[in-house]
Image (spheres, grey):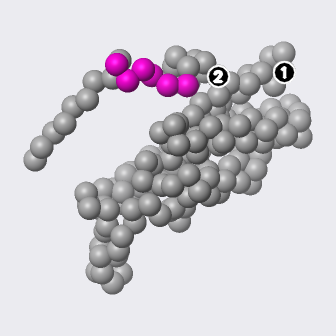
């Protein structure tokens, strides 16, 4: 059963990656049904997504869901700030034993309002698909959200990597 789960996840991921590569650098793609070029730049796309939930559940689902909602209210608010670059992380202790590690991200072409719309749709999937689970990822082509009960974002507690520490590589074809 676990092998089947991994095959399905791998197939879904490869489908999304393949479909995403159909877009060109001008911000448009050819509609596969009509062949008509369509602009997608700056538009929210939650039509196709990938949801991955941890198989383990928390013990107090009601309390955890409430804490998770408050936690992502803050992360979403941080993500849509113009200075955030469309990315934010957070850490919250929800019990003596559990800490939530989370992140939200939008593509840079989305306005703050569009980013918030995409993130709200993704967060709704936490309540629908991942209710009470110890971790969940929702990936859309224009935004993604994730939470886990283990640290997966490094360095933990840091919102951003200083731009001086980044290396840029520009490739011309």
The magenta segment: 159-164
Q: Which residue is mark 1?
A: 95
| Residue 34 magenta-highlighted | no
Quick check: 169 left or right of 8?
Answer: left
Out of 82 and 57, give the one closest to the viewer: 82
Residue at image location 71% in from the left, 54% down from the top: 124
Where is residue 49? Give x, y as percent. 53, 56
State the quadrant of the N terminus: top right
In this rendering, position of residue 76 left or right of residue 57: left
Residue 145: image tag: none
Query: Residue drawn at (29%, 76%), measured in percent from left and top?
Result: 37
Identify the mark at residue 150; answer none if there is no mark.
Answer: 2
Position above or below: 129 against 57: below
**Of pointers 1 and 2, the one earlier in the residue sequence:** 1
Q: Secondary structure at mark 2?
A: loop
Q: Is the Cβ of the residue at disc 1 closer than 8 Å to that at disc 2?
A: no
Q: Position of residue 13 (x, y in %)?
A: 44, 49
How far from the left and from the top, in percent, is residue 32? 33, 76
Mark pair 1, 2: CA separation: 13 Å
Can residue 115 be seen from the camera position used here? no
Predominant SS of the magenta segment: loop
Question: Mark 1: few, some, or many residues within 10 Å (few <14, many ≥20)?
Answer: few
Taking the spot 45% from the left edge, 49% from the top edge, the residue there is 107
Q: How many residues crowd around disc 2 within 10 Å: few (fewer than 14), some, or many (20 or more)?
A: few
SS label for mark 1: loop
Residue 59 falls in which quadrant of the image? top right
In the rendered view, tell whether residue 30 sits above or below residue 45: below
Q: Give the image quarter of residue 134.
A: top right
In this view, 26 is above or below 151: below
> Within the magenta stretch, is there residue 160?
yes
> At 26% across and 61% down in the image, what residue appears?
26
Would residue 169 appear left or right of 118 to someone viewing this image?
left
């Amino acid at each position: 059963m676990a092998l089947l789960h991994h095959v399905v996840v791998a197939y879904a991921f490869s489908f999304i990656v393949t479909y995403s590569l159909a877009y060109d650098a001008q911000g448009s793609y050819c509609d596969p049904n009509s062949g008509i070029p369509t602009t997608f730049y700056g538009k929210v796309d939650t039509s196709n997504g990938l949801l991955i939930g941890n198989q383990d559940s928390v013990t107090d689902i009601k309390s955890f869901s409430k804490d998770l909602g408050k936690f992502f209210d803050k992360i979403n608010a941080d993500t849509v700030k113009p200075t955030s670059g469309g990315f934010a992380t957070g850490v919250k202790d929800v019990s003596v034993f559990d800490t939530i590690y989370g992140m939200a991200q939008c593509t840079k072409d989305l306005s703050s309002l569009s980013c918030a719309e995409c993130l709200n749709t993704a967060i709704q999937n936490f309540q629908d698909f991942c209710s009470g689970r110890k971790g969940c990822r929702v990936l859309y082509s224009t935004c993604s959200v994730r939470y886990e009960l283990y640290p997966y974002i490094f360095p933990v507690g840091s919102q951003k990597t200083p731009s001086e520490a980044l290396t840029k590589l520009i490739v011309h074809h």
